[in-house]
Amino acid sequence: MSLPSQVLHIDLTKRKYWVEDRGELFQLYLGGTGVAIRLLEEECPRGADPLGPENPIIFAVGPLNGVLPLASKTVVMFKSPLTGNLGESHAGGRSATAIRSAGYGAIVIKGASETPIYLAIHEDKVYFRDARALWGVSSAITVGRVIRELEPSPGLRTIMRIGRAGENLVRYSAVMLETYRHFGRLGLGAVFGSKKLKAIVISGSKIIRVKNRKLFREVYREIYEQSIKTPLMKKYYELGTPINISPLNKIKGLPIKNLKETSSPLAEKISGELMAEKYLGRRVACSHCPVACIHLAALREPYPDEKYFYKTTMISYDYEPMYALGCMLGVFEPEGLLKLLDAVEVLGLDAISTGVAMAWATEALERGIIKKEDVEVELKWGDYEAYIEAIHKLANASNEFYRVLGMGVEKASEVYGGKEFALAFGGNEMPGYHTGPLAHIGFLTGARHSHLDSAGYSLDQEHLKEGKLPDPEKGAEELFKEESWRQILTSLVICLFARKIYKEDVTVKALRVVGIETNVEELRKLGIDILKAKNKFKIREGFDPSKLRVPKRIFETISPHGKIEEGYIKRAVSKFFKLTLD
Amino acid sequence: MKRLAVIDSERCVGCQLCMYVCNSRFGDAGLTKSAIKVRSAGGIERGFVVVVCRACPDAPCASVCPTNALVKRKGGGVILNPSKCIGCMNCVEACPFRAIFWDAEDNKPVICVHCGYCVDYCPHEVLAMEVWPR
């Protein structure tokens, strides 16, 4: 098998599975995002209920997974229960090589089980295992530990699982992989939960053939050296993504307390530098990534009831979760923040949406829009213990208020009010950048409403150095170009952190290793096609660019580029959708 | 002679590049033919275990081979003669480190030849070549 082509179909209702050869699809669209969107068009019926058995879960990998370093990710697509249209999320861990080694390019899961199950996919065999005893277990980490003992192939498998939040259909619940990696955004956890699917284990030992062996060694070495011997990846391996906290705080682009502020001297207490100095306990990597951006803090806590008795918990900390659960909630006490991060991990929630939801609830409570009886907890900026309690209530959908909050801030503000400070874009909660208009335009126009769609935050910062913003139309073109190219990377499937290594010409060369002859122009065109297909699916499912809501708050809070102008955003958004939908 | 040694598994980040490049010595990708293995020590939070042939001076895997397909190598470790191997897996069982892996495609053991190729791709100095026996 040199290129991925096999698609494994699993029907949870009938407990049946079969394999289809879709070589033609992989030939046209490479893999990952490109193939997943075509499968989603085919498999997801128009108007499907995201939490109904008809919603498919589609995992897809690409031709470079298992072959070259930094091609370490798996793409998943589904209809999002949070936004009601495109659900797409990316994760690493050991998933990508595991899926390819099992012999598949994609896995499509449909239907729903009546009782909790987990799937064990070992090459050609799929086992539907009873998971009734695992349902309701309080920690998603424990679920991983249990399955680890039950299934073969340690080191070569992926173990995906949901926590309580997914079981309880919180619309932004996540799926955890191995430990510390996630399909975080847009609610895959709830889709698992709706199918009574607690976990999936995948392993295999199929060889991945390479077409051009000499070039394989050459390109392998080149990419390896670029990733560890040049400054290209430095920010990811030294301090990791939390390196962003200080510079964003300095330029006043760090959203704090539901974006009422953008800078605080307290933020320095959770800077990447201080976190590394005081807490960094271990660095770990996804399979096939020498960079090891995953930073684990070792949190040592005494037991209050017994002298000289301690526990040490390893907690993953990254910029986005620290922004959402730290800055947005005014939690600048590092140990409190780590405990919050751990709670979100254990419960299986998306950290960004959870933080933004809690920030909205805190402000809504402050303003008297919601009542103490609804929230049951006195939410106050900085009070991490209150937030931990509230997050448990959220994951357990413990009352009507938390059930609504679990549908996202878009929905919660429709029910309770407070839309002007409900920080969601296209229904997805906001990532950690108030760097200028381009970041927000990216959140609005990006197919996933994610900062990683088109990296507007990065463009904002580049233009800040130049001292001026481009015309809105020009800005939209820059975002469109970036998002289109990223479709190629996520079709192969390369980690977006490696985008500066896998430049256009390097990608063309890398593809020759596996026998794909193409050129930059062809790839660019394909990237545009894939992006258009994603947007077409969104429109099919009711997405309306003309009805995109822009939270007023972003115009009130000054950005590093000054006051963000509504007119600028409107013009850029309109231009972007002209490029994408024509 | 020299052997491949695990110098400090605490520095291992679990990237598995050693496994990928070991596999690639035959020209293909993936992990199926790796003679080295990295897995978590009971969950990634606890770090990693790096499993590799330690080049035993008196190798038990060779002793249990019924067809003499595994020959003790001067200075430690073994060399496989694939044409003699019948795929009985006795050697796999005999190694207490479980450092003999299985190539399901060819139905033959995969055993480290201590070439050191993986060392070049270990970004964190977990692995090194060392003089052996010490």
Image (cartoon, rainbow, N blue to C red):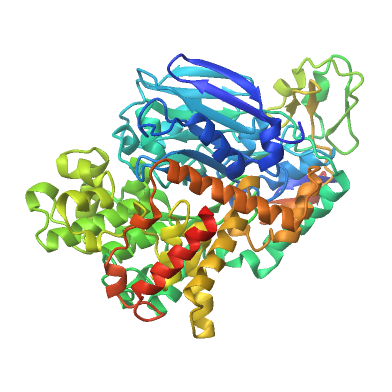
Q: Residue at x 89, y 23 (%)?
A: B82
Residue A447 placed where, x, y %?
48, 52
Looking at this view, is A441 or B9 the one in front? A441
Residue B29 placed where, x, y %?
76, 39
Looking at this view, is B119 or A2 the one in front? A2
In the picture, the quarter occupied by the C terminus of chain A is bottom right
Q: Residue at x 26, y 71 (%)?
A: A260
In the picture, the quarter occupied by the N terminus of chain A is top right
Task: Tell me how many marks there are.
Answer: 0
Residue sticking out furthest to the front: A582
Residue A521 placed where, x, y %?
73, 57
Q: Residue at x 50, y 58 (%)?
A: A452
Up-down relation of residue A368 to residue A93 (above or below): below
Residue sticking out furthest to the bottom: A467
Up-down relation of residue A576 to residue A401 (above or below): below
Can I make out residue B52 in this image? no
Looking at this view, is B60 or A101 the one in front? A101
A120 displayed left or right of B70? left
Up-down relation of residue B1 to residue B61 (above or below): below
Q: Residue at x 57, y 37 (%)?
A: A38
A203 displayed left or right of A399? right
Q: Quadrant of residue A222?
A: bottom right
Can I make out residue B74 in this image? yes
Residue B101 placed where, x, y %?
73, 29
Q: Quadrant of residue A144?
A: top left
